[in-house]
Amino acid sequence: MAAQDEGAIPFSIAHDQQQFRLLELPPALLDLIASPDPPVLSIKSQAAPIPAGTPSSKPAYAVLCTSNKTFQLRQVQTSNSVFVTQPVYKAQDDDIALPGLAAIATCTATLELHPVVGSAIPYLKSVLPVYDISEDITNAVGNSQSKSRLFLDIPLSDDECEAGWQELVAFELDSSSFRPSAKTLLQIWQSINAAALAEGISLGSQFLTENLHKAIEDEGYPPSLLNSLLGGLVAEDESFISAWTCLDAKKCVRWVGKIVLEVKGGNSGLLTADFLDAWKDCLPEAWREEAELEAIHGSYVLPTSTTIASKGDLENNEKEPSESSAKTASSRKWHEKFARARRR
Amino acid sequence: MPSIPLYLPNLPASEIDRSGITLNPLPRLLQTPGGRAILEIQGTIHAPALANSPEAPESTETPIGNLVFPLYSEGMREDDTQWMKRVYLYIGKHQRLTGEVKKLAKPLGVLGRRIRDNMEDMEGVEGPGGVENEPVERKDGDELEILEVVRYKIIFSTRPEPVGGEVLVS
């Protein structure tokens, strides 16, 4: 029983309690911490109203973002007393300072991190006004929000936001951001294609970016939109917005196919043969042969044996996140389930 | 605020500042660069409500008891983990909790508000540095920081056992 005094560390609770949270660190974060120059992460929450399609208007959740990963933060309560302690030096009996341990904070909850893979497209679609050119009249009302400002309100990492931004061919103009309509995109692509033919620019090999800009200058498209469009289509090994550009044939063929299908395929069935012809007509001569349904695999449905329709990525993208969030919500709220059962 | 910056500790976790070892009473395994450790009790400590005891009016903490690692000794080999199996926490003079040191499946980050000032200046406020820094002192922004990465915790999950107090008194 004499053991208590031997090597005993006096334990106390500090009066001045600090505010700490405990955060579970997954390996990905530990790696970042151990790296020689740790990056600054960000905790984001959604400020804007949740896009339509999300069921309950639950309060926005918070996420922790690295540059390319997103983790959902979940607060897990514990009934245990969890103390954060720190060494203290307390003079005992006016002589030696005895090192002791003091609890400087009590944490009633731990934050768990759950990786989420999300698409920024539904969020971006809800906040980006559509930029539409029809019959030479530009329809676009600015939102006076820059790209970086918008990204702050999207609960996803910057890389994921950027991927969505690129997929929508979004662009900044006059300190607003927009996403072009499919019709406008197709129109621009046709201009590019026609200009390339007229000027003898081969899109699949290196060409001067400036030449292409000049060739379609008269059409009056915002240069930032053109750059955004070309940026999504350049060959992988290119660093874009350099003087020279080289487009990737596969990417162009696939992208043009999707856009053509989105524009032409309304509610009524579009004949598959007609679609393929329209698609081929939008491509440079050299790429015509590559316009096969295989190239846009996953983006179309065939309602009948002769017709084709776009898989309506708008629908898809909005359904997915809401479904998953509904699932997690329902599985975790066991007490609500009980309450529901009791009411019956 | 839609986006809050979160700073990571700038000390790599492997590079523990060994100079502070003598000042930290805990076994080496539990020591962290900033000295923070996690101690968990299944239950609640009912400390005396009285903030300052009459004999030590300037005290800043309420004494609870003693923490003992009965199987631990300084000169142990690093890979000897037998000592982790037993930790005592004496509460007051008559109760004892038995617990253990556990490695956390996922290390925990101690997350706090980032204080933008230099930490050194905060420590010695009475020095000239403190005066110099007064205008910007404690400018707590809406910024967060992981202050520490804790990989082990001391956990007490048993009921308190009664122990004789005479030993302590003598």
Image: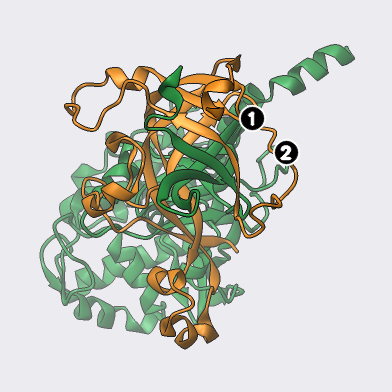
Chain colours: A green, B orange
Q: Chain of mark 1?
A: A
Question: Which of the 4 image quarters holds residue A332?
Answer: top right
Q: Nearer the viewer, mark 2 or mark 1?
A: 1
Res B146 seen here: yes
Can you say whether A48 is above or below B122 in the image?
A: above
Can you say whether B157 is above or below A105 in the image?
A: above
Q: Amino acid at mark 2?
A: Ser
Can you say whether A335 is above or below B53 in the image?
A: above
Question: Which of the 4 image quarters holds residue A142?
Answer: bottom right
> Residue, x 81% and y 18% (percent of image)?
A340
Tell me if B145 is positioned left or right of B21 in this view: right
Q: Which residue is mark 1?
A: A329
Can you say whether A317 is above or below A1 in the image?
A: below
Q: Amino acid at mark 1?
A: Ala
Q: Are marks 2 and 1 in contact (CB under 8 Å)?
A: yes
Q: Which residue is mark 2?
A: A56
